[in-house]
Image (cartoon, rainbow, N blue to C red):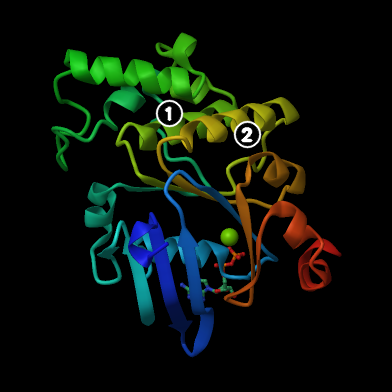
Amino acid sequence: MSNTDFALAVEDLTVSFDGFKAIDKLTLYIDKNELRVIIGPNGAGKTTLLDLICGKTKASHGSIRFQNIELTKMAEHKRVRLGIGRKFQTPSIYENLSVFKNLEVSFPRGRSVTGALFFKCDDTVKARVQVVAEEIGLATLLETEAGLLSHGQKQWLEIGMLLMQEPELLMLDEPIAGMSARERELTAELLQRICKNRAVIVIEHDMDFVKQIAHKVTVMHQGKILAEGSMDKVQNDPKVIDVYLGH
Ligand code: ADP
Ligand code: MG
């Protein structure tokens, strides 16, 4: 496979914060329709890697290509328009709006800085809201105020808001933190559904959850890749047991 066939190609990526390399010559390739899980101890650089891909943090060195387009110098909002969606750890939904409205305002067309909440709702948008609401399991709660949803439902709503933009790369940082066991199960099913049409990167600590969803696992440590491959392979890797799983 040539490097241009990947959804995402990260090569030799480095970022220094005052001389400290949070990401250190990291190379990583993600296939189209792949669900990749990134694990590793706290401070390994996992969140920083997502910050670099979405453009929140600028790389010091190296390359990030999305569908063979170089991203490293591109502004964050342009990366969103190219199809990169990022969910942060704390959800940013509009608590006082309905589930429907939250999804509607996330539809990319007709959005402006001031007009985000006020554009016309046409049939295309409604149809898209319906599809996404079903995908995230909130189709029966469209009229519910988002603030009244459970913690897990709020997380799914935020994933839905990202799906409204039909991202081709979706990145989720610890999406099941604070969820109930049942919500975790439903989230695993949700992720398996949504990776059919796109590449997905998930950072997660819960190994049972990782086992359920991961196509491949990347283990990070000190800004580098410690191991990569199937869950079985990385779980039995002595280096991984030593720095991460053994604790
Ligand atoms: P992880 O998500 O794997 O727990 P992070 O990516 O959050 O790790 O952090 C990796 C390292 O980079 C940590 O030592 C953290 O303190 C440092 N770091 C992250 N962002 C910054 C920043 N903006 N300035 C300075 N140091 C940072
Ligand atoms: Mg983190």
Label 1 within 8 A of ligand 2 by Cβ: no
Q: CA distance from mark 2 to mark 1?
A: 24 Å
- Identified at 61% across, 53% down, the residue is 216
Q: Nearer the viewer, mark 2 or mark 1?
A: 2
The answer to whether residue 3 of the structure is visible from this angle is yes
Relative to 19, say whether 192 is above or below.
above
- Identified at 51% across, 45% down, the residue is 90
Whether tag 2 and tag 1 are in contact, CB under 8 A, the answer is no
Residue that badge 1 annotates: 95
The kind of secondary structure element at disc 2 is: helix
Q: Which mark is residue 188?
A: 2
- Residue 188 on image: x %, y %: 62, 34
Earlier along the polypeptide chain: callout 2 or callout 1? 1
Under mark 1, the amino acid is: Glu
The answer to whether residue 59 of the structure is visible from this angle is no
Q: Quadrant of the N terminus?
A: bottom left
Q: Is residue 127 left or right of residue 95?
A: left
Q: Nearer the viewer, residue 196 or 160?
A: 196
